[in-house]
Image: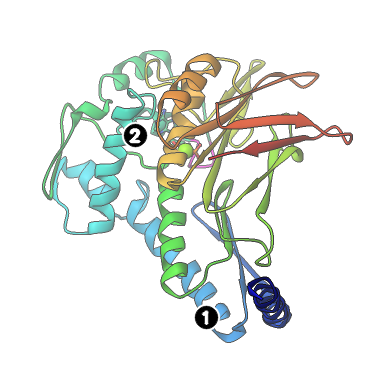
Amino acid sequence: MIKKTAFVLLFITLILNCKADDNYKKYTQSSFSMGTLLEITIFSTDEAKVKKILDESMKLSNQLEDKFSCHKDSIITKLNKEKSLIINDNEVLDLLIKSKYLSKLSKGNFDLALFNITELWGFSSGDPKLPDNNIIKNELKKTGYTNVIINKKEVKLLNGVSLDLGGVAKGRIINLIAVFLKQNGFKDFIINGGGDLIVSGKFQNIRPWRIAIVDPFDKNDFLGFIALTDKSIVTSGDYERSFIKDGVNYHHIIDPKTGYPSTNEVHSVTVISSDSTKADAMATAVFVMGEKKGIEFANKTDDLDVIIITGDKDNKKISYSNKITAKKTDKGKWEFTYRD
Ligand code: AMP
Ligand code: MG
């Protein structure tokens, strides 16, 4: 009897699910934000609401970008100029506290106070150039997260350092958009801010999201896929912003120890974590650490897994941390699996 009731209940549930799914549609909106393409996809039954919330999410992204930018007329720009400021904006203050914590966690391989060096290279200006070696050496003295002192709302920058939150802001912005979407009752969505992703719930309410991982040797192709739900997945690659001078490829991820783009054979780092702010900063940090140290670091750090690609076009090497497995499919692509 119990079995029969359970069967009837299951059957009714299935019918209800099928009915609900008829109107459970996919809505996607994209717009240029954070210096990249921001794309949000939501599954919902409420078309009017989803369109309104998608518009508001794009606005939210632009507002947050204006706050966190070190190039616009922002609180960060004011702090960089005045070197001491009371910060009353909680979103800015929270990101500063978190960025300092992540700088420490990564032993300075991610450094929130690297502006004086990143500004010299000019990758975010769209017109990067190779700086003079002596200037790099000088400016390197004015970097380092330990020079950022946060005391309640007061932030002080010592020894001439300035802040660049470019390596962490995208992760925080998609995090705040995800919070906004959840507050508005959405559960199944994906936010992609130029390679920084949050996947929530399921695709069409039935299966995990399937995320493609870019081939760093051909950014228009994919190296493989990974199925995820309720996670953030962030990739930093040397193909994103770079220039070649005298046969040398200079990319936008700087080793804070040298002031030059990191040179350790890493071509891309993909981080999986439940925290997109952490994932963003740690993708940059692990890129600088290199393959061996990066894997060790991920294996001993809570809520942090990585896929690191080294080698060259014809001889790619793929390394990954403990919670990830991988196998090559017949089609020559990798199928990665993540287990919590
Ligand atoms: P992402 O787009 O997350 O890979 O971050 C790259 C951006 O972060 C660069 O354009 C710089 O503005 C900044 N950046 C580069 N290297 C570092 C570093 N080692 N620590 C912190 N920020 C960095
Ligand atoms: Mg980053």
Q: Main secondary structure of the magenta part?
A: loop
Residue 63, placed above or below residue 324: below
Instruction: Estimate the x, y position of residue 164 in percent, counting from the top left.
Output: 35, 39
Where 72 sits versus 281, above or below? below
- SS category of the residue bearing label 1: helix
Q: Is residue 155 above or below residue 284?
A: below
Say above or below: 88 vs 326: below
Range drawn in magenta: 123-127
Q: Which residue position holds label 1?
A: 52
Q: Position of residue 174 (x, y in %)?
A: 47, 55
Q: What residue is disc 2 on?
A: 115
Foreground pick, 194 / 27: 27
* Quadrant holding the N terminus: bottom right
Q: Which residue is painted at 26% across and 50% down in the image?
A: 94
Tell me which residue sits at (71%, 83%) in the image: 19
Q: Which mark is residue 71?
A: none
Q: Does residue 193 show up magenta in the picture? A: no
Task: Determine crowd level at label 1: few under 14, some 14-19, many 20+ residues with C-alpha closer than 10 A.
Answer: few
Q: Nearer the viewer, residue 334 or 252?
A: 334
Label 1 to label 2: alpha-carbon separation: 37 Å
Q: Is residue 89 left or right of residue 294?
A: left
Residue drawn at (53%, 67%) of the image: 187
Report whether 211 appears left or right of 99: right
Question: Which of the 4 image quarters holds residue 2?
Answer: bottom right
Of 46 and 202, nearer the camera is 202
Left or right, 74 with respect to 172, comes to: left
Category of crowding for the residue at label 2, using alpha-carbon neighbours closer than 10 angstroms: few (below 14), some (14–19), many (at least 20): many
Residue 90: horizontal and vertical position, in percent? 23, 58
- In the picture, measured across the screen, residue 300 lies left or right of residue 187, that is left
Q: Amino acid at mark 2?
A: Phe
In the image, what residue type sits under mark 1?
Lys
